[in-house]
């Protein structure tokens, strides 16, 4: 009876909190459910996911910290993403004591959604955190929404798309900067700041329709997302915090790597969305293939374990999705867990909490592997698929001795070096870029520098890192210029990859010749025909052919052409060449 009463009380409280905004509500949306309401069930009921305490330890839960009062008056520049359910029209800027620089700092008179403001409904936000309903929309909608929606990248993108512009416009009061006179009295500035700009990314815009369960809407219905070569409106020439996101150019061409960003970076979404690395297109790129329709359902589901984040998390939650249920590619929650602070520290900033689903050494290779058991070799005649993990670990090729790579566990250092500076160019952004595209040393060095005006002289800087310089950046030697991009490695990279391609071409030719010696018109025909027989019935020449075929597929599918593990890759391709050439007949 007691348990029933407690459950009834919790449900009643939730209903009252959801219903209360009908009379008076803080922030922009009346249907916003504060996180404390979710706490009642998601902290105390065993049958419900216990995520509240874990979320409370993340930076989402304490998103503003000591800068809360000073940053929130600047509207959607900060508060739109750092609070729950922000309404810029409700901000009441209030001057505070004179700062050491001679200007008056500003806070918001209704910055805290405390008891009084909750009753009045005039607080600019519903809670001082990235709360549950910032992502789940509201209690009622979240409980009715399909689980696949949780993998929608647009949920994270509404804030992690710094320097985006809103599609709609909003009327918001500017914070009037003031100076002080000789007596220390505030003097209104004749040119009040326009830092509160609706053009910035806004967390208060509901991305979706909560009616009948949350139905997500495309982020582009609310925001103009920056992309290389973009021309957004309405303030294409805005200065200061409202300036456009800019991208590095190389030989006059705009790249996908961003020049200037939020401190710690908050532009992961545009990078991910515009990248050609394939994460955003992982599902559509797979299902659009001609062979997809003819694959057995079990095979399709095996592919979707890595090609669809929503399919994967649905299975992990105990559901039984089919291939037709998959909606998204490799999205944010495929690698990150919003409810957990994680244990992995940032590569370029120890204080950064990347909230990864696993260790940095494992999160990539959970999918980027050829599914070859540790210490084993691929089956002769098989086509190996993306054996990045095996290459790094130095095993899996046929008749090749194991040889681990010095690059093992360093996927992030090479594939995600920071490219952006903070607004003043005072320091490099401390979170990795999310294009995942390799920035070669010569490309980083050739990027056109960025220059900003600063007292007393302008600051000019080039791209901060290449894919190699996190580990291999060369300091200045006596009488030499520093080499921050490790360009001294470029000739080695070029030579080794050229050699691998040359050897691989030789393997291709040798396999074609070997196939004809075996009585087939092509390598593919030979491989298919031999695979129809049990391996124990293969001739010695057929076995040699199949080993060479598999070793070449290992090299070609792995794709780094010697860079991930030079010694092992070189041995594999040369072994494949020897195996193919050793075919003497049928």
Image (spheres, helix red, strand yellow):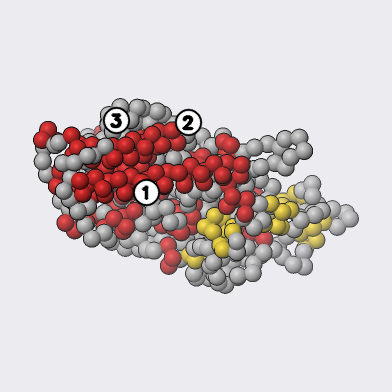
* Sooner in the amino-acid sequence: mark 3 or mark 2: 3
* Residue under label 2: 406
The reply to whether residue 389 is visible in this rendering is no
Residue at point 10%, 35% (across, down): 537
Residue at point 29%, 40% (across, down): 581
Q: In the structure shown, which secondary structural element does the residue marked by tag 3 occupy?
A: loop
Q: Badge 1 local density, few (<14 within 10 Å), some, or many (20+)? A: some
Vertical comparison of 424 with 49: above or below: below
Which disc, if any, is residue 505?
1
> For the residues carrying marks 3 and 2, which lies nearer the camera in this image?
3
Q: Badge 3 local density, few (<14 within 10 Å), some, or many (20+)? A: some
Task: Measuring from the top left, give residue 502's x and y in whole percent.
Answer: 42, 47
Q: Is residue 183 left or right of residue 475?
A: right
The reply to whether residue 278 is visible in this rendering is yes
Task: Measuring from the top left, give residue 34's x and y in whole percent.
Answer: 43, 49
Answer yes or no: do the residues labelled 2 and 1 have beta carbons within 8 Å? no
* Residue under label 3: 399
* Sooner in the amino-acid sequence: mark 2 or mark 1: 2
Outermost residue on the bottom side: it is 234
Q: In the structure shown, which secondary structural element does the residue marked by tag 1 occupy?
A: helix
Q: Residue 403 versus residue 6: which sits nearer the camera?
A: 403
Residue at point 43%, 33% (across, down): 567
């Amino acid at each position: 009876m007691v348990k029933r009463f407690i459950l009834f009380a919790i449900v009643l409280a939730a209903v009252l909190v959801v219903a209360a905004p009908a009379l008076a509500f803080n922030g922009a949306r009346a249907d916003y459910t504060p996180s404390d309401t979710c706490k009642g069930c998601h902290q105390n009921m065993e049958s419900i996911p216990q995520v509240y305490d874990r979320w409370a330890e993340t930076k989402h839960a304490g998103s503003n910290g000591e800068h809360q009062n000073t940053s929130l008056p600047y509207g959607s520049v900060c508060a739109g993403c750092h609070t729950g359910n922000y309404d810029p029209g409700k901000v009441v800027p209030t001057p505070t004591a004179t700062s050491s620089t001679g200007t008056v700092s500003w806070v918001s008179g209704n910055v805290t959604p405390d008891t009084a403001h909750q009753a009045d409904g005039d607080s600019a936000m519903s809670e001082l955190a990235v709360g549950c309903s910032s992502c789940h929309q509201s209690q009622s909608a979240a409980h009715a929404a399909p689980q696949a929606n949780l993998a929608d990248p647009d949920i994270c993108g509404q804030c992690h798309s710094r320097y985006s512009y809103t599609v709609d416009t909003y009327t918001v009061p500017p914070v009037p900067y003031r100076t002080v006179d000789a007596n220390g009295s505030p003097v209104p500035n004749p040119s009040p700041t326009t830092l509160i700009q609706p053009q910035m990314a806004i967390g208060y815009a509901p991305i979706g329709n909560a009616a009948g369960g949350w139905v997500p809407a495309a982020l582009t219905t609310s925001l103009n997302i920056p992309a290389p070569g973009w021309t957004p409106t309405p303030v294409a020439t805005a200065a200061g915090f409202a300036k456009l996101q800019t991208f590095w150019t190389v030989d006059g061409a705009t790249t996908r790597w961003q020049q200037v960003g939020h401190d710690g970076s908050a532009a992961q979404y545009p990078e991910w969305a515009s990248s050609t690395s394939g994460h955003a297109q992982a599902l559509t790129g797979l299902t659009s293939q001609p062979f997809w329709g003819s694959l057995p359902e079990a095979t399709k589901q095996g592919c979707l374990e890595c090609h669809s984040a929503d399919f994967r998390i649905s299975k992990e939650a105990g559901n039984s999705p089919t291939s037709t249920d998959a909606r998204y590619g490799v999205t944010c929650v495929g690698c990150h867990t919003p409810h957990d602070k994680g244990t992995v520290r940032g590569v370029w900033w120890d204080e950064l909490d990347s909230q990864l689903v696993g260790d940095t050494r494992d999160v990539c290779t959970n999918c980027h592997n050829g599914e070859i058991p540790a210490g084993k070799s691929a089956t002769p005649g098989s086509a190996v698929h993306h054996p990045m993990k095996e290459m790094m670990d130095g095993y899996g090729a046929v008749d090749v001795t194991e040889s681990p790579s010095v690059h093992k566990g360093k996927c992030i250092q090479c594939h995600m070096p920071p490219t952006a500076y903070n607004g003043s160019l005072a320091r490099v952004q401390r979170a990795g870029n999310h294009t995942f595209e390799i920035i070669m040393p010569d490309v980083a060095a050739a990027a056109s520098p960025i220059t900003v005006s600063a007292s007393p002289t302008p600051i000019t800087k080039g791209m901060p890192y290449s894919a190699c310089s996190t580990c291999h950046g060369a300091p200045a030697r006596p009488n030499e210029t520093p080499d921050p991009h490790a360009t001294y490695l470029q000739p080695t990279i070029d030579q080794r990859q050229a050699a691998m391609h040359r050897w691989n071409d030789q393997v291709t030719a040798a396999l074609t010749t070997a196939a004809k010696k075996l009585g087939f018109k092509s390598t593919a025909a030979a491989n298919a025909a031999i695979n129809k027989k049990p391996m124990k019935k293969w001739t010695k020449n057929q076995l040699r052919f199949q080993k060479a075929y598999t070793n070449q597929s290992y090299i070609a599918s792995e794709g780094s052409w010697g860079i991930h593990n030079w010694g092992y890759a070189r041995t594999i391709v040369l072994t494949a060449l020897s195996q193919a050439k050793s075919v003497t007949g049928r």
